[in-house]
Image: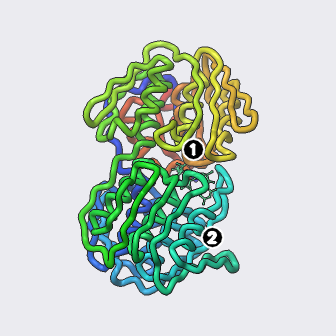
Amino acid sequence: MYKYVIKGGNPLVGEVEIGGAKNAALAIVTAAIMTDETVLLENIPDVSDTNVLLEAISVIGATVERIDRHTARINGSTIGSVSVDYEFIKKIRASYYLLGALLGKYKHAEVPLPGGCNIGSRPIDQHLKGFRALGATVDINYGMIMAEAEHLHGAHIYLDMVSVGATINIMMAAALAEGSTIIENAAKEPHVVDVANFLNAMGANIKGAGTDVIRIKGVKKLHKVQYTIVPDMIEAGTFMCAAAATKGDVLIKDIIPKHLEAISAKLAEIGCDVIEFDDAIRVSAKKRLGKTHVKTLPYPGFPTDMQPQIGATLALARGTSIVTESIFENRFKYCDELARMGANIKVEGNSAIIDGVESLKGARISAPDLRAGAALVIAGMSAEGITIVDDIVYILRGYERFAEKLRGLGADIQQVSEEKEIQKFRLQVS
Ligand code: EPZ
C-alpha cells in the first residue's frame, strides 16, 4: 500500500500553513447533527479520519454537502437511524462521539463498543458513567452500546481521570439535558474548548471550558451556525519538531501560539531559537540539540500526541534524554523502528531512555500508529541516506498533504505505492 520514500539530510526551510484540528473536527462534525437546522463548517482538515466521520453521519441519514475539501454543510433533520455501523467505529474510534450527540438529541443511541488501538486499551467507562449520571440506561450487548433515556437531567459528574473524549461526549449529551450539569476534572485541551465554543454558537449554555470545571445549563434545542475549526496544535507541533530535528528554519503559520507553549518551551530548552508571532511560530536550530526530560501530561502539559515526535528529535541530541508517557500504555513502538536506523533508545516501563547519537542511517521502517508514523518521517528527513516508511495509511488519518507540505520546505519525500517508484526516486535523488 502507500509508503513514503525519503532522502534525508535537507534542513527544512520556509513557511508552512497549518490546517484545522482533527481532534476538534471529529467532535464538531458529530455535534453538528444535534440541530435540525443547517450548519456550515469551515477549516475541516481533509484527512481520512474526518472524511470517515462525515460518511458515518451521512449513513445514518444526515445531509452532508462538501462545498470544498475544507468546508461542509451539514443538516441533521434527515437522520433516520440512531444506530451506527460497526465499520465506522472500526475505522475511527471517535465515532463514539455519536453516542453523546444522538443521546442528547434523540435520547437514544446505538454505537459499537470501540476496541483498543495501537497505543493502548482506551476504555470508555468514563463516557458511560457520565451518560448514566445524566439519566440514561446504558447496556452493552454483543459489542453494541445501547444508550437511552426518557429524558436527560443535569448531574454533577466527577471524572476519575482527565479524559478528552469523555469530557466532550458528556458535554454534548448534557447540552440538551434538563437542568444543570457540572463536569469536574474536565479535560482542558484547545479542542475541548473549540467544541464548547461550537455548541455555544449553536445556542448551548456551556461555561468553564478550558478549566477543569465545566458548567452546562441544558437548553431545549440548538440552531444553525457557521463555524471555523481551531488550528491543529499537533500538526503545528509536528512541523516544529521537524524544523528542529533537521536543523532547519521554518515559520509555522495560521496557528494559536499559546496552544503550543509546552512544545515551544521544550524546543527552546534544547537549543532551538523559537520566536512567537500573533498567529505563527518560527523554529530554527543551527547546532546539535541538547538533552532534556519530557513527561506527557493533560493540557497544558506536554501533549502525549507530541511524544513520538520529540522522541525522534532527541534521538540525535547530545546526551541522554528521558521521555515519560503518562497517558497511554503503548506509545513507544516507534523506538524499535528508530533503533533500526541506529538510534540508541531503551524503553523501561512508561519511560524511554534516549542516548543521543551523532547520526541516523536511512532504513526500511513501518509506521505503528499516527503520531509514531510522523515521528519516523522526522527521523527519515534527519537521517543519512534513503528511508522508506511503510503503512503510512496511519499518517494519512491525521496529516493533510503531509509529503507535499514537507516538500514545500525542501524535504526530498515522495508518497509512492509501487516498489518500482522507489527505484525511480533513488535514481532521481542520487
Ligand atoms: C483524545 O483521545 C485524542 N483523540 C487523542 O489523540 C489524544 O492522545 C488523547 O485525547 C489525549 O489527549 C481524539 O481526540 C479523537 P482520553 P481520547 O480520553 O479522548 C483513559 C491522536 O493522535 N480513559 O483523554 O480517547 C485512556 O485510556 C489521538 O490524534 C479511561 O480510562 O483520550 C487514557 O489513558 C491519539 N476511560 C487517558 O484516559 C475513559 O472512559 C486519556 O484518554 C476515557 C479515557
Q: Which amino acid is tagged 2?
A: Leu
The amino acid pointed to by label 1 is Lys
Q: Which is more toward the observer, 301 or 372?
A: 301
Q: Indicate the position of residue 25 as horizontal and vertical percent values.
A: 40, 58
Disc number at residue 262?
A: none
- Taking the spot 53% from the left edge, 36% from the top edge, the residue there is 377
Per the image, label 2 sits on a secondary structure element best described as loop
Q: Identify the residue under disc 2.
A: 113
Along the viewing direction, whichever of 220 and 75 lies nearer the viewer: 220
Q: Does residue 180 appear to the left or right of 338 in the view shown?
A: left
* Direction top: furthest residue: 287
Colour treatment of the image: rainbow
Residue sitting at x 48%, y 66% = 170
- Binning the other alpha carbons within 10 Å of mark 1 as few (below 14), some (14 to 19) or many (20 upward) gives few
User: Residue at 41% of width from left, 52% of height from top?
Assistant: 191
Q: Quadrant of residue 132?
A: bottom right
Q: What residue does disc 1 label?
A: 420
